[in-house]
Image (cartoon, grey):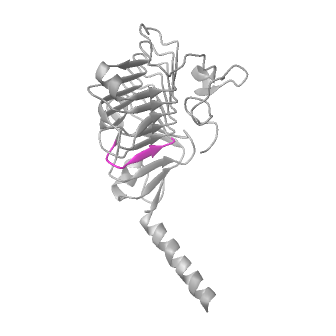
């Protein structure tokens, strides 16, 4: 009798946790062909899982909804050459997508946003634009955008940080911090951008923690980067051909992250 009671309590606890964690909505599924249709049905706490394919739409991820690609970079959100491809409301998140061909790849200005493991490429201006609240920007590839990789303005980071991203081959700056920003920037690889790898004003430089990043061959870098950062060839395996930004192990890397891993996006294994 006692064992039956314990099992019953365990089942109830599991159900409560499942409900509190929110529902899972699949794209595509019955009556849902687009990501936007799934978001209309979603509530805060729900997760939307998107199958492989090209989705030509602009997406607004509503408060508390988490958007995840079923397979890493298999689902592509294509902005069709105009506008912001993905906009994130407060406590929303996006993970595992390729986001391309918009004016801006991802835009965020609210608190507790997560941008993780995405490939943000070939947008007409900025890859990721963030205002006021710094999201968790982690393990993304931000490359080949015609403007800067990441632009942040007046950022405050209660919980967010810019960490373990690969920001490369953008036509303007790799990372630009404006206004008065107070953020943590560490363990990133910022390489081969056509202007500065890092552009930051004195107020933001003083308030922010910028350390343990690798700045390499950013073409117009006329000033020294903050102390505690590095400069070595990241030895990308096949960045231009296959978007493979993993380092060639025989050529790189003597310097590892603060957790003993390679700098830049950690996409060679599921975390």
On the image, the x and y values in percent for residue 93 come to 41, 46
Residue pictured at 55% horizontal, 16% vertical:
231
Residue 142 appears left or right of 238: left
Q: Is residue 103 visible?
A: no
- The picture places residue 94, in percent across and down from the top left corner, at 44, 44
Give the residue furthest to the right: 250
Regarding residue 11, the answer to whether it shows in the image is yes
Residue 94 in magenta? yes
Q: Residue at x 51, y 39 (%)?
A: 117
Residue at 33 percent of width and 50 percent of height: 62
Which image quadrant is residue 194 in?
top left
The relative height of residue 190 versus residue 224 in the rendered view (above or below) is below
The answer to whether 128 is drawn above or below residue 227 in the figure is: below
x%, y% of residue 13?
Answer: 50, 74
Provide residue 110's location: percent of width, then percent of height.
Answer: 30, 43
Q: How many marks?
A: 0
- In the rendered view, does 170 fall on the left or right side of 255? left
* The one of 257 and 117 positioned closer to us in this rendering: 257
Quadrant, the C terminus: top right
Q: Quadrant of the N terminus?
A: bottom right
**Quadrant location of residue 233?**
top right
Task: Inspect the magenta stretch and tell me whether residue 115 lies in it.
Answer: no
Q: Which residues are magenta?
A: 88-96
């Amino acid at each position: 009798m006692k064992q039956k009671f314990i099992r019953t309590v365990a089942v109830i606890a599991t159900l409560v946790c499942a409900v509190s964690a929110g529902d899972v909505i699949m794209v595509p599924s019955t009556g849902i062909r687009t990501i936007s249709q799934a978001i209309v049905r979603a509530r805060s706490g729900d997760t939307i899982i998107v199958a492989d394919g090209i989705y030509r739409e602009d997406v607004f991820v509503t408060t508390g909804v988490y958007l995840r690609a079923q397979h890493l970079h298999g689902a592509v959100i294509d902005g069709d050459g105009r506008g912001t491809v993905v906009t994130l409301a407060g406590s929303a998140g996006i993970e595992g997508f390729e986001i391309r061909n918009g004016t801006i790849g991802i835009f965020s200005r609210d608190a507790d946003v997560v941008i993780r493991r995405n490939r943000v490429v070939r947008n007409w201006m900025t890859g990721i634009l963030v205002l006021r609240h710094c999201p968790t920007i982690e393990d993304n590839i931000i490359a080949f955008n015609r403007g800067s990789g990441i632009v942040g303005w007046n950022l405050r980071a209660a919980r967010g940080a810019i960490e373990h991203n690969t920001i490369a081959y953008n036509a303007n700056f790799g990372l630009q911090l404006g206004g008065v920003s107070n953020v943590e920037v560490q363990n990133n690889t910022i390489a081969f951008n056509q202007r500065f790898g890092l552009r930051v004003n004195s107020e933001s430089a003083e308030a922010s923690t910028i350390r343990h990043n690798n700045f390499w061959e950013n073409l117009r870098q006329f000033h020294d980067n903050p102390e505690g950062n590095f400069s070595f060839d990241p030895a990308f395996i096949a960045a231009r051909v296959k978007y493979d930004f993993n380092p060639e192990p025989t050529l790189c890397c003597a310097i590892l992250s603060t957790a003993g891993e390679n700098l830049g996006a950690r996409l060679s294994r599921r975390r």
